[in-house]
């Protein structure tokens, strides 16, 4: 099996996204892959009017760029080729936007964290990681959030 060469990593500043990023960096380091870090903006539902929504979206865009630049800087410091992309929602759910970007960029792997910060949309639309795994045209590596180890039920029997 050939090493992955183009790894797409959706990030949002959460701890689970950081775990996915760390995993993707290690894969890139081992195989000489290039990373693309993407942040999908939340779709804004605003009854307050167009101007307010536009201002909030621009603020969200700036925050997304700052997150992406910080993580791209980490890649640059350790010698991993990396670029970034802010994805506009345009009616798409998180999974659809990431899957489309994976196809557009010709990614051969998507690495995603399992518990990112997605607000109310996560409860209404389901897990972002699950959406991505279902819709992406390439393999998806889901980096799970570690859970506390439960005691062995069979211990002492």
Image (tube, grey):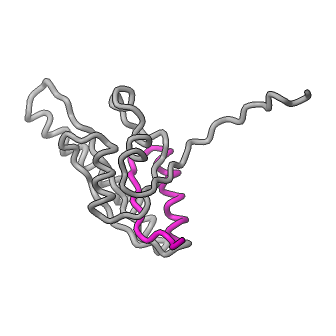
Q: Quadrant of the C terminus?
A: top right
Q: Nearer the viewer, residue 59 or 37?
A: 37
**Residue 72 vertical position relative to residue 118 in the rendered view, above or below:** below
Q: Residue furthest top?
A: 47
Q: Residue at x 19, y 29 (%)?
A: 45
Q: Residue at x 28, y 40 (%)?
A: 93
Total labels: the figure holds 0
**Residue 43 vertical position relative to residue 83 in the rendered view, above or below:** above
**Residue 135 vertical position relative to residue 126 in the rendered view, above or below:** below
Q: Residue at x 48, y 56 (%)?
A: 21
Q: Residue furthest right?
A: 156
Q: Quadrant of the N terminus?
A: bottom right
Please state if 23 lies on the left or on the right of 89 as rendered: right
Please state if 24 lies on the left or on the right of 37 as rendered: right
Residue 14 shown in magenta: yes
Q: Residue furthest left?
A: 50
Point out residue 95 in the picture as x, y percentages from the top left corner: 34, 44
Residue 140 shown in magenta: no
Point out residue 46 in the picture as x, y percentages from the top left corner: 16, 28
Point out residue 129 in the picture as x, y percentages from the top left corner: 43, 43
Q: Which residues are magenta?
A: 1-29
Q: Quadrant of residue 66?
A: bottom left
Please state if 41 lies on the left or on the right of 134 as rendered: left
Q: Residue at x 55, y 65 (%)?
A: 26
Q: Nearer the viewer, residue 109 or 60?
A: 109
Point out residue 8 in the picture as x, y percentages from the top left corner: 39, 59
């Amino acid at each position: 099996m050939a090493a992955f060469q183009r790894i797409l990593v959706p990030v949002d500043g959460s701890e689970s996204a950081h775990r996915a990023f760390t995993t993707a960096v290690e894969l890139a380091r081992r195989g000489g892959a290039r990373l693309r870090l993407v942040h999908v903006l939340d779709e804004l539902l605003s009854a307050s009017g167009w101007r307010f929504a536009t201002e909030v979206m621009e603020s969200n865009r700036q925050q997304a760029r700052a997150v992406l630049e910080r993580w791209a800087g980490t890649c640059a410091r350790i010698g991993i080729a990396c670029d970034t992309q802010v994805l506009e929602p345009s009616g798409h759910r998180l999974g659809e936007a990431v899957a489309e970007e994976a196809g557009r960029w010709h990614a051969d792997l998507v690495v995603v964290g399992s518990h990112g910060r997605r607000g109310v949309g996560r409860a209404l639309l389901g897990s972002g990681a699950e959406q991505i795994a279902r819709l992406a045209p390439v393999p998806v590596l889901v980096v799970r959030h570690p859970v506390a180890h439960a005691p062995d039920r069979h211990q002492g029997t």
